């Protein structure tokens, strides 16, 4: 179960396939999917979907604030539609439930049969998920901490995405967490030779104010001629999208491109030389992230540029697949780009080819299936 569209959400998508190898598997998410035993839709968030967006959002905020202020966290999660969903799913007597979202853990424990197991894939450090947002802290901070206290120790297995998150969960909640990297599907791609005076950089994925995506665009104003950056991004905030597009229009060496289908991401990336992800550490999750895109860069055989984000920086330096900016400042990022020779980029690409053979979903599936097999055998 995941509160997303699993078909385009890499980690839940792969997990569903791996779990499916153990027996008939149902899916619960934000879309109907073919290829599984049964596919169920999560209830719409908010009221009933009939209110205007702004009114529906105001309702959701007021509802969450009320239940948070009265510490009725469970009530905030168990809407009437979720109760109805749980009643129906309980009859299916699940032996194993995998949740990719913290707020779905109460549902997971409600529908797993007695003696069954719940696996939680903690893709974020949820107590500080978006802690740089005042509104998020008011609405969800206390609730997420309560959910962690109530449910983490009950999970048969907890997974996470980076060493930093793994350590934080251990330090704060005393639980052992398995590190499962978000490795991408293996692609047999030959690294290309980097062309002098035509070095192509790409950033793909979400663009928003929390990630400060605009900072990568602003840094490009300081790079030497011969470098260009494409943003292949999805922007959910219309205001931020307008700001980003205006900035790109003023920056001659930056373009915004439309996202491609999930299966086309890595072949599209392979047309570039460097994958870049500079994300200021405005909250704990962004500071210690190891996102899908890092491993998609490897499969596309790109060199990689990251900021001094501890876990990404350690990985990039350990495997020689790229370089780490001295800081998140614009000039530092530009100096990092300018300092790379074409020969150095080609070495990073070759190292990415070697890393791609180790860090791919085939290898990760062996790890996850072993963990599940050990769990169900207990």
Image (cartoon, rainbow, N blue to C red):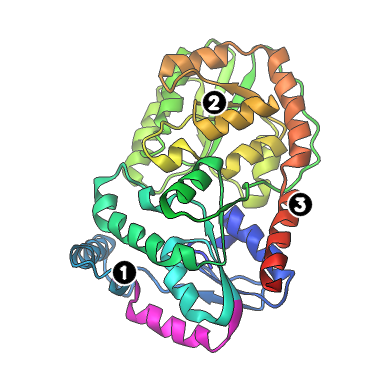
Residue at numbered disc 1: 46
Q: Nearer the viewer, mark 2 or mark 3?
A: 3
Could you tell me if residue 251 is visible in this image? no
Q: Nearer the viewer, mark 1 or mark 2?
A: 1
Q: CA distance from mark 1 to mark 3?
A: 38 Å
Q: CA distance from mark 2 to mark 3?
A: 31 Å
Q: Main secondary structure of the magenta part?
A: helix
Indicate yes or no whether the magenta region holds residue 23: no
- Mark toward the start of the polypeptide (1 vs 3): 1
Which element carries disc 3, helix, strand or loop? helix
Which element carries disc 2, helix, strand or loop? strand
Crowding around mark 2 (Cα neighbors within 10 Å: few <14, some 14 to 19, many 20+) is many
The quadrant the C terminus occupies is: bottom right
Q: CA distance from mark 1 to mark 2?
A: 38 Å
- Mark toward the start of the polypeptide (1 vs 2): 1
Q: Is 231 drawn above or below residue 117 in the view shown?
A: above
Which quadrant of the figure has residue 243? top left
Crowding around mark 1 (Cα neighbors within 10 Å: few <14, some 14 to 19, many 20+) is some
Q: Is residue 273 left or right of residue 123?
A: right
- Mark toward the start of the polypeptide (2 vs 3): 2
Which element carries disc 1, helix, strand or loop? loop
Residue at numbered disc 2: 229
Residue at numbered disc 3: 362
Q: Residue at x 28, y 57 (%)?
A: 142
Which quadrant of the figure has residue 140? bottom left
């Amino acid at each position: 179960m995941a509160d997303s569209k699993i078909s385009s959400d890499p980690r839940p998508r792969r997990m569903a396939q791996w779990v499916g190898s153990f027996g008939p598997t149902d899916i619960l998410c934000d879309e109907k999917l073919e290829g599984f035993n049964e596919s169920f839709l999560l209830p719409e968030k908010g009221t009933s979907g009939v209110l205007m967006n702004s009114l529906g959002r105001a309702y959701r905020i007021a509802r969450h604030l009320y239940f948070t202020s009265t510490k009725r966290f469970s009530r905030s999660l168990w809407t009437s539609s979720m109760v109805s969903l749980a009643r129906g799913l309980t009859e299916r007597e699940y032996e194993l439930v995998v949740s990719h979202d913290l707020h779905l853990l109460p549902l997971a424990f409600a529908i797993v049969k007695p003696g069954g197991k719940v696996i939680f894939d903690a893709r974020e450090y949820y107590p500080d998920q978006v802690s740089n947002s005042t509104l998020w802290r008011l609405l969800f901070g206390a609730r997420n901490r309560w959910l962690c206290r109530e449910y983490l120790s009950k999970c048969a297995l907890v997974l996470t995405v980076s060493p930093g998150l793994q350590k934080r969960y251990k330090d704060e909640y005393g639980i052992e967490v398995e590190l499962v990297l978000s490795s991408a599907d293996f692609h047999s791609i030959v690294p290309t030779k980097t062309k002098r005076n035509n070095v192509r950089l790409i950033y793909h994925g979400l663009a928003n104010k929390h990630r400060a995506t605009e900072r990568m665009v602003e840094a490009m104003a300081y790079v030497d001629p011969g470098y260009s950056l494409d943003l292949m991004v999805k922007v959910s905030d219309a205001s931020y999208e307008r700001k980003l597009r205006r900035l790109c229009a003023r920056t001659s060496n930056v373009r915004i491109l439309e996202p491609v289908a999930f299966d086309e991401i890595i072949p599209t990336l392979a047309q570039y030389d460097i994958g870049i992800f500079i994300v200021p550490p405005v909250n704990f999750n962004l500071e210690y992230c190891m996102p899908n895109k890092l491993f998609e860069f490897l499969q596309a055989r790109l060199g990689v540029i990251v900021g001094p984000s501890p876990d990404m920086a350690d990985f990039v330096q350990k495997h020689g697949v790229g370089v780490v900016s001295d800081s998140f400042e614009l000039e530092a990022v530009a100096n990092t780009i300018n300092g790379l020779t074409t020969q150095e980029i080609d070495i990073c690409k070759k190292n990415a080819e070697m890393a791609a053979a180790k860090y791919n979903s085939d290898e990760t599936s062996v790890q996850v299936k072993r963990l599940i097999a050990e769990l169900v055998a207990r």
